[in-house]
Amino acid sequence: MENHEHKDEHKEHPSDVKPEHHVVHHERKSMGETLIGNPWIVASVVLGILVIILAINSFYSGFTGGVVGTVSEDTAANAVLDFANSQTGGGVELVEVNEKYGLYEVVVEYNDEEIPLYITKDGKNLVQGVTPLSAFDVQDAESEPEAAEVTKSDKPKVELFVMTHCPYGTQAEKGFIPVIKALGSLIDAKIRFVHYKMHAPEENETPVQVCIREEQSAKYLDYLECFLEDGNSSRCLKETGINEDDLNDCIENGNAEKYYNEDSDLSEGYGVQGSPTLVINGKIASSGRSPSVLLTTVCSAFNTAPDKCSSLELSSENPSPGFGYNASGSNTTASCG
């Protein structure tokens, strides 16, 4: 798992926000007003940019049908919308698509914001206007610094740093949870959060997860597995029996901020620069994201590997990025950072 450069201005603390069951929905602002008053709107725009960048590469045939020329408005809009929802677990809706400025303007809605995206009529190119592509940087391992060799110990300390809504972070979590369950108390395992945020929902979800992890820990993995299905926190709080009064107290009394600050300090101290980043015994480690590969990586950190390391058989299938368990993903090293 690799890491990337980040900007300090992304850093945000959960004391400024409340989980989604506290959120009060206000009348929607205009795009200009929102940009002035809420710099996190960039995160919503980032979703659209990520969708189009990946759609151009992964859905080229869906846009063009393999023939150079103009595709229909519906074809362009549906390909963008379907792929966006497959990566985010849902919540992206098509508002409208029009022919404008000699392009297709596809307007999508995400987190109560309408985001216009412009695509050339052949479906090949995104025309960005004022939206910076650098707001969401996805890079391959070739541009990444090499991870340090795994440091060994009798009981490895294994920490996975993620963002709650980074599609590659959720991919790694789906691979890591089976390893945590399989090795149990043989390792000191924890899912932590990087010291900055890039996706708007993380402002609400990060405090929820750190509080459950620290104060209702017996239910944390159950909650997380549920959350990774579709990103529906409200449903998962109820289905996994989280005490919501205690959760609200944790957020309101400042404990959520304290727990997140501990993660943030560790993230900066380790040099974490992207989601996901695997840290073993205090050193950034490189690993694939399937349960079997992660198990091998973790087991390599024991001074003397326990019998379980050779007897366990975990899935060798790479989980898909984003939410959902129905699809398999590639052996990617991409991350959000």
Image (cartoon, rainbow, N blue to C red):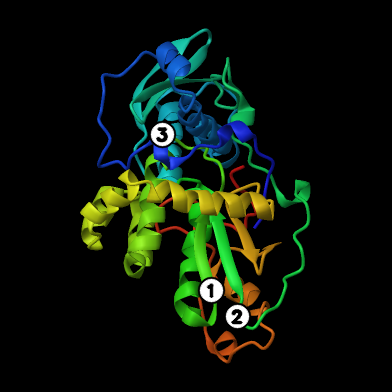
Position of residue 212 relative to residue 233, above or below, is: below
Closer-to-camera residue (97/139): 139
Cα gap from disc 2 to disc 3, whole angstroms: 45 Å
**115 or 146, nearer to the observer:** 146
Pinpoint residue 139: horizontal percent, then vertical percent.
68, 43
Q: Which amino acid, by three-letter code, is at mark 2?
A: Lys
Quarter that holds the C terminus: top right
Residue on which disc 2 sits? 155
Badge 2 marks a residue whose secondary structure is loop
Q: Picture coordinates of residue 145 (x, y %)?
A: 78, 52
Q: Is residue 151 left or right of residue 230?
A: right
79 sits left or right of 286 in the view: left
Q: Residue furthest bottom?
A: 307
Q: Are marks 1 and 2 in contact (CB under 8 Å)?
A: yes
Q: Residues within 10 Å of mark 1 (few under 14, many from 20)?
A: some
Q: Is residue 290 left or right of residue 304?
A: left
Q: Secondary structure at mark 3?
A: helix
**Most foreground residue, 257 or 42:** 257
Which of the marked residues, 2 or 3, is nearer the chain's N terminus? 3
As drawn, the label of residue 188 is 1
Which residue is farthest front? 253
Pick the quarter of the image with the N terminus: bottom right
Three-letter code for the amino acid on which mark 1 is drawn = Asp
Residue 81's tag is: 3
Q: Nearer the viewer, mark 3 or mark 1?
A: 1
